Image (spheres, rainbow, N blue to C red):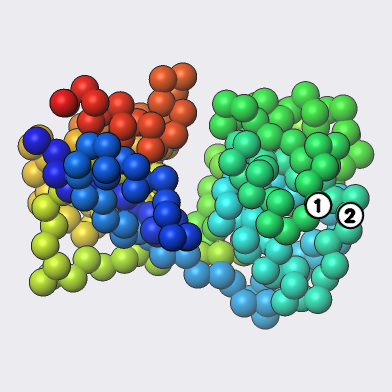
Amino acid sequence: MTKKILITQPRPLGEHNPYDLLEHHHDVSVDFQPFVQIEGLTAKEFREQKINPLDFSAVILNSKVSADHYFRLCKQLRITVPETMHYYCQNESVSNYLQKFIEYRKRRVFFSENNRYEDLLPTMYRRNEDAYLMVLGENYTEEMYSVFTEHDIEVTPAVMYRTAPYIWPEDRPFNYDVIAFFTASGAHAFCDNFPDFQQGSTALIAYGANTAQALTDAGLRVDKMAPTPQCPSILSAIDNYLSEQA
């Protein structure tokens, strides 16, 4: 019977979070611990790339983290992001998150309903005058934006943050029935922390194909995936798994 769940992300802000209902409904305990910690580049480090954000009329954002660090660095560089800036987001969650920073207008913000960059291409073709800046982490690969270059859309990658692995303390117990992963880098960091991990009956839930592939490549079993039509989020995937086990 499932009793303990580990969410490999920070605890959501606020007095109540979406996982509270999950705990109550399924009588489980949920812990939060990212295996990858995000560190923003300093303004000095960013300047070394010789990129001026104002040279671009559009920004490609693949996560809330990328949005955080784009606006953080612009503020530190004393750059006022123009109201004419266009935002291309990998999914609706990221696009909605932009309301934290800008006045949300549909004609300025575009997103994929299927978490696929390919869905953004038609809009980009219609707006072929845009110059694109893509916010990425330190260890990005060309594969992360190849879908654009393969369709003759020029993208300039800009590193604005880096990741550092979290080291699980030796005296901290690790006894979870379900572990939810959100990124491939988090899956890799987990495997580095527990190289001798024996999965057994522990259920692993992955968000995104890259995350699932990272777990599979490590010889682990992925029990549930999101987003899918049945499970559009990690939360719904966990709820679905628990309901099946009841």
The residue lying toward the viewer, choosing from 100 and 47, is 100
Q: Which image quadrant for residue 27?
A: top left
Q: CA distance from mark 1 to mark 2?
A: 9 Å
Give the residue displayed 27% in from the left and 43% down from the top: 24
The residue lying toward the viewer, choosing from 208 and 106, is 106
Q: Which residue is mark 1?
A: 103
Q: Position of residue 82 (x, y in %)?
A: 88, 58
Q: Which image quadrant for residue 230?
A: top left
Give the residue displayed 38% in from the left and 38% down from the top: 235
Q: Answer left or right for 51 relative to 100.
A: right
User: Is residue 91 shown to the viewer in this render?
Assistant: yes
Q: Answer left or right for 112 relative to 26.
A: right
Q: Which residue is mark 2?
A: 83
Q: Secondary structure at mark 1?
A: loop
Q: Secondary structure at mark 2?
A: loop
Amino acid of disc 1: Glu
Q: Quadrant of the N terminus?
A: top left
